[in-house]
Structure formats: structure tokens, C-alpha cells
Image (cartoon, grey):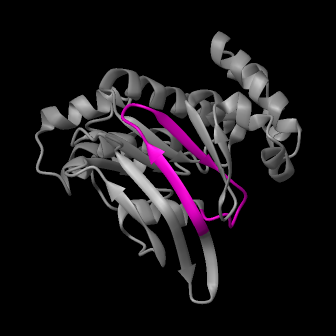
Amino acid sequence: MSLISVEHLDVTYGAQRVLHDVSLEIEPGEIVTIVGPNGSGKTSLLRAIIGATKPSAGRVRRKPGLRIGYVPQKLHIDRTLPITVDRFLRLANKVTRADCKAALDVAGVPDLLKRQMSELSGGQFQRVMLARALINDPEILLLDEATQGLDQPGSASFYRQIEAVRAETGCAVLMISHELHVVMSASDRVICLNGHVCCEGAPAAVASAPEYRALFGTGTGGALALYRHDHDHDHDHDHPHSHEAAE
């Protein structure tokens, strides 16, 4: 059974239709990335999936009792607020310190439990947000531009951690990103969105699709190949210009 099934979804805000006739399925254990230009409806789709936005047509079906972990685009915390990572993780969850420690382990930051939230780097903060999403053992992780504000090596490291999380927990992942050079090789399937589904499939197939190239240009195929090389040899820092190629 699919974890999530989106059927002929329309989303409108006032007179503006941001999504039209969008259909997709998310299966257990797969990593799916939604890419698209600004204003293409990516966040609106995610909001409809989690139930925060009501469709104007179509429907979203979730597996009964589906456990969802959500990593938002941004979360602003008052830098003067004295709160440790441990306390932050337990704010909205009835969990033990051991649960928090286990989630931080899976997120790749086992030593942050007693650190102040205000002292964390951008990359550490996002790993803590990932741990927060993992703490209730989700069947699917939803990530909305989760690496916004991180540099390229930081983004690449974060997405490698997502692959490690999937390998360890078996959870599915649905993520939105504009960082084509990073997410493509971390994905089993890519969905290209521009108000509707332009194309979808394996990363290499989507990167060569005319609809994808019309939106993102032809340079992205080279960036995808370059990132694959980085990923295989773990040398992201050797290619500082790959980000420019993907824009």
C-alpha cells in the first residue's frame, strides 16, 4: 500500500491556481525529491500532503495511522533563550532523554544533547531539526528546503545523512529542494513540478527530459554527473563551481 497518494490535486489561493491536476504516489522506503522553479507550487503541495492546505479539487490519501516526521524550511528560535538541545527535543514530545539521544545518533550528531540551541551552527541546527522529526519513528520524512542557508558542502553532507537515515530506519523520504546538483543523486525518483507534474522518474531520466531542461537549462545534467562523482569519492569540497553549474 502506498504511504501517500495524491489524486488530481488542485490548489488555489483566491483567484490564483498554484497546482493543477497533480497526481503522485509515495511508496514505503523510497526517497522522492520534488524540484521546480520558485512559485511552482512545491511548498503548497507539501502543505496539502500534511493537511495544512485544503485542496480545491482532488484529494490526498494517507495510509491509515501514517507517522510523519516534518523538517520545516525555517524555524526561528530566540537566540537569547537559554534552552538545551535535550530540552528542545522534549518540548513537543513525551519522550525520554534516551529517545532524544537515539534520534541525535541517527541524525549524525550524537554529541549535541547538552549544547545550547543558540550555540549551534546552521548545519548542526538542521541536524537537530532532523532528530526532532525522527524522534517518533516516522514512516515518512517530509523535508521542505531543509538545507536553505547552508553552503554546498553542508548541504551535501545533510543529504548524505538523509540517505543514511533511510538505510538505518527504512523510512520513506519526500523532500523539496532547489539544489539540483545535490539532491538528484540522493533520490530514487525525481518529480519536476511547475504548477503541474512536468516529468518524473529516475534522476538521470528526468535530467535529460526536455521539460526539465526547459525549466533548468542543460547545465544541470553536467552538475548531476559531477555530483555523482563527488558522492562516489566523497570529495565535495574539490568542486566549488558545481553549484554555479546547477543554477
Name the side, left or right, on which 178 lies relative to 210: left
> Going by the image, does 176 lie left or right of 60?
right
Which contiguous range is marked in magenta? 20-41
- The residue that appears at 57% across and 35% down in the rendered structure is 189
State the residue lying farthest toward the bottom: 14
Residue at the (80%, 34%) spot, across then down: 208
Up/down of 98 relative to 47, above or below: above
Looking at the picture, how far across and down is residue 238, in whole percent? Answer: 77, 19
Q: How many marks?
A: 0
Residue 58 visible (yes or no): yes
Residue at x-position 78% and y-position 37%: 243
- From the viewer's side, name the closer residue of 151 and 188: 188
Determine whether, in the image, residue 76 is placed left or right of residue 229: left
Q: Position of residue 13 (x, y in %)?
A: 56, 83
Q: Position of residue 152 (x, y in %)?
A: 68, 36
Question: As rendered, which of 208 and 112 lies closer to the eye?
Answer: 208
Residue ranking furthest to the right = 218
The vertical placement of 152 against 195, above or below, is above
Residue 79 visible here: no
Q: At x 59% / y 48%, what residue is drawn?
A: 34
Confirm whether the magenta stretch covers residue 26.
yes
User: Percent position (x, y) of residue 126?
Assistant: 45, 44
Give the position of the N terminus as an image quadrant.
Answer: top left
Say which of 120 and 142 sits in front.
142
Q: Is residue 158 above or below residue 84?
A: above
